[in-house]
Amino acid sequence: MTTASAEKTAENGAGEEGYNFAYLDEQTKRMIRRCILKAVAVPGYQVPFGGREMPLPYGWGTGGMQVTASIIGHDDTLKVIDQGADDTTNAVNIRRFFARTAAVDTTEVTAEASIVQTRHRVPEDPMTEGQILVYQVPQPEPLRKLEPREIECRKMHAYKEYGLMQVSLYEDIARFGEIATSYSYPVMVNDRYLMSPTPIPKFDNPKMHDFPALQLFGAGREKRIYAIPPFTKVKSLDFDDHPFEVQQWEENCALCGAEDTFLDEVILDDRGGKMYVCSDSHYCARRRAEGHRGTLSDSAAAAYAAAVGAADRPSEDGESAEWVT
Amino acid sequence: MYVAVKGGEEAILNSHKLIAEERRGDPAVPELTLTQIKEQMQIAVDRVMTEGSLYDRDLAALAIKQAQGDLVEAIFLLRAYRTTLTRFGETLPIDTAKMAVRRRISAAYKDLPGGQVLGPSYDYTHRLLDFALAAEEGAGEPQAEEAAETVAEAMPRVTEILNHEGLIEEEIALNDEEPVADLTREPMEFPADRDMRLQNLARGDEGFLLALGYSTQRGFGGNHPFAGEIRLGEVAVEFAPEELGFAIEIGEITVSECQMINQFAGSAERPPQFTRGYGLAFGHCERKTMAMALVDRALRARELDEVIEYPAQDEEFVLYHSDNVEASGFVQHLKLPHYVDFQSELQLIRSLRRRHTEETLEAAE
């Protein structure tokens, strides 16, 4: 995350020819880093920034990419996930973008990455001090669904007037008996700002609390940046008699047998047959490599992996991918 | 260096090859050249330059070719290129009163100094398919006759004529103290000032502005508008480099301009007076400038103490949704995987249904 190394590389012309290191020009990166510093200083506050047009469409991670482009240096190792998986097309595409424009190392191993850019998930493996988690944010304003006007929302944040949100959660309980929000579940950061955790499932909300890594959030279309510094209090909204709860599955991961991860439902046939697998593809692969097994036989697991086009290449670092054979 | 590669990457690369193949079409047909697009699809080029916020006919033509004629995609390509360019500074405001006019019409006066100049327009063509154009060798090269006299040099703006009597509000004078807003560098802030609103509208989607402008005419807001003046032509662009201290002409651009004149009943502070709505676009984009002028006027409701009750008057609604690059990206991002959120919703709806069944059973007992 050093500017010096970024500029050095820019002069060296590493990465995509004709473009600066990591695509954005140094002035823009500096502007974004200033906004990031402000965001870190005021946890959960949405800092407006002069978002640039990126060569990927709005809504596809332009905010996260601008944050990553501004903090990435030559020595960084980048991991990109979408829905928890490294091999979804958008994750592949963004990883390619940085491999191309910044010529940085990329990885799928959460522990090896200095920067993890994510859409819709927090990795299952714990992250540590010194790492940075960059979230792609479609809608930074947690109040937007209740109040479409920016002017009004900013006033509500300024006065810490979040009654509207509490009432909306209460209405859910009155109508459904529970809070009917399963993702983008609002949180209070540092007892001050109401914040959208981005559309991560509420399953991941507790991970944000006291998280050792720096969490940065970039919303490109809406031109906002916000942050949670390491070891900050993050509380999911709830009521004394209706405490916050995360999703639970009756099943375990069919591949690695994990009991405590977020599971994706995989439809096996048109007669209601289904199984559940970890949404975090790296976490699942690591557990399989360590010898953990789910209900699925090894041959069935291999067939599944082949069918979804998952990691079947020979691994260069000997870390992942062996489990499928 | 270790770069993680997986199945998705190959699919993406193959998808690029397929779309390139589709773009080229039948290889037996000669490939389209940029010059052909630039010369024979001028209005498409103009729209891409306007909404792409970059005056460069060659790059706009390239973007249109690359996007297979999808103009919103072409606008996106041009924008993504524009954002990497260095900014040297701001030009002086262009002076459209000094325009080399090719077309100038006013719907407010029958005759006026400088006269009505119809110029190039589809307005009075009969919209009958011209099968002569379908012929392989084309329809030949029509040549307009040279006019008996040249267009008047003095071509004062209609709004200036009205201004002599004070019938129309004054144009806001240039204020050197306050720099002009630039929403490509700074995020939009609300309430937005007119400079930022106009920039947003100039970049805004033509279809969106057309529908909004139309809505003001049909009764969803609106103050009866007159097309005070519409002109098309070439204007000089001047730039004053700091080290020189005086302005030099750096080129010429084609612009379309529309000045709408609107009724205004007056308020406690202001006498009854005509008010302005303004539209400006690169090249020949007349429909866009007219729609823009209507929406600009509607958005001035706050400033003129009018009741804000319709979509076109609502600046957050208009300015946040006018940009087709943003809109197209976000609408189409729904194509991206949403497995995790969908799984969460599945869990929730199963739980809600379980509760519903239990409650129904209990009620039955």
Image (tube, coloured by chain):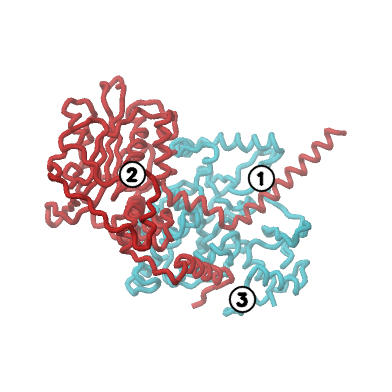
Chain colours: A cyan, B red
Both labels 1 and 3 in a single chain: yes
**A173 over A97 or under it: above or below:** above
Which chain does the numbered disc 1 sit on?
A
Residue B129, percent from left and from top: 40, 49
Indicate the position of residue B318 as horizontal and vertical percent values.
42, 39
Return the residue nearer the eye: B195 or A48: B195
Label placed on residue A244: 1
Assign a secondary structure to mark 2: loop
In which chain is the residue bearing label 3? A
Residue occupying the point 62% across, 74% down: A320
Q: Check whether the beta carbons of the residues at disc 1 and disc 3 lie within 8 A of each other.
A: no
**Residue A215 appears in view:** no
Residue type highlighted by circle 2:
Thr
Which amino acid, by three-letter code, is at mark 3? Glu
| Quarter placement of the C terminus of chain B | top right
Tell me the residue that label 3 is attached to.
Answer: A319
Circle nearer the N terminus (1, 3): 1
In whole angstroms, how far apart are the C-alphas of marks 1 and 2?
67 Å
Residue ID for mark 2: B125
Q: CA distance from mark 1 to mark 3?
A: 37 Å
